[in-house]
Amino acid sequence: MASTDTEQQEYAVALLQPEVEEAYTTDGSLGVDGNPALKHLTGGWRACRPILGTEFCYCLAYYGITFNLVTYLTAELHQSNVAAANNVSTWQATCFLTPLAGAVAADSYWGRYRTMVVSCCIGVAGMLMAALSALLPLLIKDTSSMASAQEIILFLGLYMIAFGVGGLRPCLMSFGADQFDDGDTSERISKGSYFNWYIFTMNCASVISTTAMVWVQDHYGWALGLGIPAMVLAVGLSCLVAASRAYRFQTTRGSPLTRVCQVVVAAVRKFSIAPPADMALLYDLPEDASSMKGVQRIEHTADLRFFDKAAVVTASDEEAPRNPWRLCVVTQVEELKILVRMLPLWACVAFYYTATAQANSTFVEQGMAMDTRVGSFHVPPASLATFQIITTIVLIPLYDRAFVPAARRLTGREKGISDLLRIGGGLAMAALAMAAAALVETKRARAAHAGMEPTSILWQAPQYVLVGVGEVLATVGQLDFFYSQAPPAMKTVCTALGFISVAAGEYLSSLVVTAVSWATASGGRPGWIPDDLNEGHLDRFFWMMAGLGCLNLVVFTSCAMRYKSRKAC
C-alpha cells in the first residue's frame, strides 16, 4: 500500500512539473525577493507601463530644460551667444557620454534598477539646483556677485543632471526589455514592440517640452519653469519605485570592461601560440562550477580566431591556479567577439546621426534664408522640426500595429523584418533627406539670385519628414539590435552604444562642417556655408552629405551581410 501511495505521488509530481517550470521565467531573472521570477506576477507590460511612465517624465523634465537653456543663459545670466552655445553644446555632449559610465555601473555592481533610482535622485537634486539659480535674485538683494553665484549653482546642477541622465538613459531601455522573457514566444514579440513605444513616449514628451514647458518659462518666469522639471522627474521616480514588486531583475557579474580587457591581454600574451584545430580543447568550466552559476553560456564561433588564444590552455596554466589575465573561458572570449562584430555596424549608425544632425543646424540656417511667413503667421525656422517629431509619433503606432503584423505574415519573422534591414532603411531615408534639402536649396538660391519672391519655408517640410521616417526605422532598429545582440552580462553597456553613436554623430557633424568651411573658403572665396547663404553653395554641401550617406549605406549593407548574428535579428 505504501509503495502504491509513493507511485501516485511521483506521478502527480510528474504531471505538475511542466506547470511549475512554466510558472517561472526561463532567462534566470529574479523577483524583488531574490527568488526566481514568477511569470504571472512579474514582467510583461504590467511592469513596462510604469517604466514607460518614468521615461515620459524623464524626457519631459530633461527636454524642458534643454530646449530653452540658451535663452536662460543669454537673457538671465547675460552670456554672449557664442559662450551660451558652447556651454549648451558641451553639456549636451556630456549627457550623451555619461551613459557609458552609468551602463558600466549597472552591469558591474549596482544592477539596472538600483542605478536608475540613484540616478533619478541625482537628477532631481540637479534640477532643484537649476531652479535655485533662478530663485537666487528673489532671495538675495546684493547683486554685486549675483551672476557668478547663479552660474556656479546652475552649472553644478546641470552636470548633476548629466550624471543622472547617464544612469537613466541606458538603464530605462534595457531594464524595460528585461521584463520580457526570450524563452517565451509571445513575450519575445512584445519586446520588439517595447522599443517602438519607448521612442514614441520620448517624442510625445519632446512635443510637450517644446510647447507647454517653453511657454511656462517665457510667461511665468524661470524659477517655475525650471522647478516644474524637478517635480516631473520626482513623479517619474515615484512611478518607478511604486511598481518594484512587478519587476524582473537580472544578476550582475562584475565589470564587463574588465572581462574584455582580460581576453585582450591573455590573447596578446599568447600571441605566438596557435589555437588548436579541435575547439573542444579550449578552456571552459563545467555547468556546475560556482563561477558559472546563473551565466548563460555562449557557443564558440570560428571567426576572429586571434581571441581564441586567450582560451588556449598551456603547461604553465595547468601548473598554477587560473589567472584570468592569462586564461579565459570560451564564453568570455565570445563576449568580446560579439562586441568586435558590432563595431563596424555601430560606426555606420554613428554616421547616420552625422546626417540627421543637420536638422538642428544647416536645415535651420537654410530656413532662416527663406520666407518664414505662412499666411499671417511667422514660423520660426527651428520649429520646422515639429514635422519630424509628428512624423515619428504618427508612424510608430502604424509600424507596430499595421506594418509588423503584415510583414510577419509574409516573412515569418517575429519582428516582421530584421533589425539590420530596418536600420538600412533608416540610413536610406537620411540620404534621401539630404538630397531633398539639396533640391530645396537649389530652388531657394535660384529664386534669390533672380530677384524673385523668397522661397517658402514650407518647402523644407519633406526633408524633415524623411528624417522622421529615418528615426522610426534606424533609431528604434539600432536600439533593439544592440540590446538583442548583446552578451547577457553586457546588455546595458551595449544599449549605451546606441546613445554614444548619437554623440559621435554630433561630434563628426561639427568636424565635417568645419572641414568643409575651411576647404571651400580658402583664397578669399566665401565657401559653401558662409554667413550669407546667397553667396555660398549650401546645396553642394547637402549633395556631398547625400553621397556620403549612400556610401555609408553600401558599407553598412556589406557589413550586415557578413555579420554573424548571435540570434535572429
Image: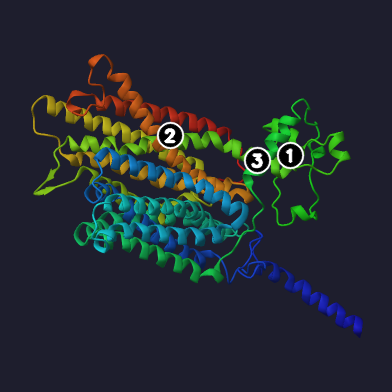
Three-letter amino acid code at the position of disc 1 = Trp
Please provide percent x and percent y for residue 311: 76, 38
Q: Which mark is residue 429?
A: none
The three-letter amino acid code for the residue at tag 3 is Val
Image side of residue 437 versus residue 124, left or right: left
Give the position of the N terminus as an image quadrant.
bottom right
Instruction: Tell me the number on the disc at residue 351.
Output: 2
The alpha-carbon separation of the residues under discs 2 and 1 comes to 35 Å
Q: Nearer the viewer, residue 269 or 16?
A: 269
Mark nearer the N terminus (2 vs 1): 1
Q: Are marks 2 and 1 in contact (CB under 8 Å)?
A: no
Q: Closer to us: mark 2 or mark 1?
A: 1
Displayed quadrant of residue 510: top left
Q: Tell us which disc is closer to us: 3 or 1.
A: 1
* Of the pair 400 and 471, the residue shown nearer to us: 471
From this viewpoint, which residue is outermost toward the bottom? 1
Q: Residue at x 28, y 24 (%)?
A: 540
Q: Residues within 10 Å of mark 2 (few under 14, many from 20)?
A: many
Q: Is residue 320 left or right of residue 490?
A: right
Residue 351 placement: quadrant: top left
The residue under the point 36% across, 44% down is: 469
Foreground residue among 106 and 70: 70
Please report the residue visible at 39 percent of the width from the left and 35 percent of the height from the top.
354
* Element carrying mark 2: helix
Q: Earlier along the polypeptide chain: callout 2 or callout 3? A: 3
Q: Tell me the residue that label 3 is attached to.
A: 260
Residue with the mark numbered 1 = 325
Q: Secondary structure at mark 3?
A: helix
The mark lying in front, picked from 2 and 3, is 3
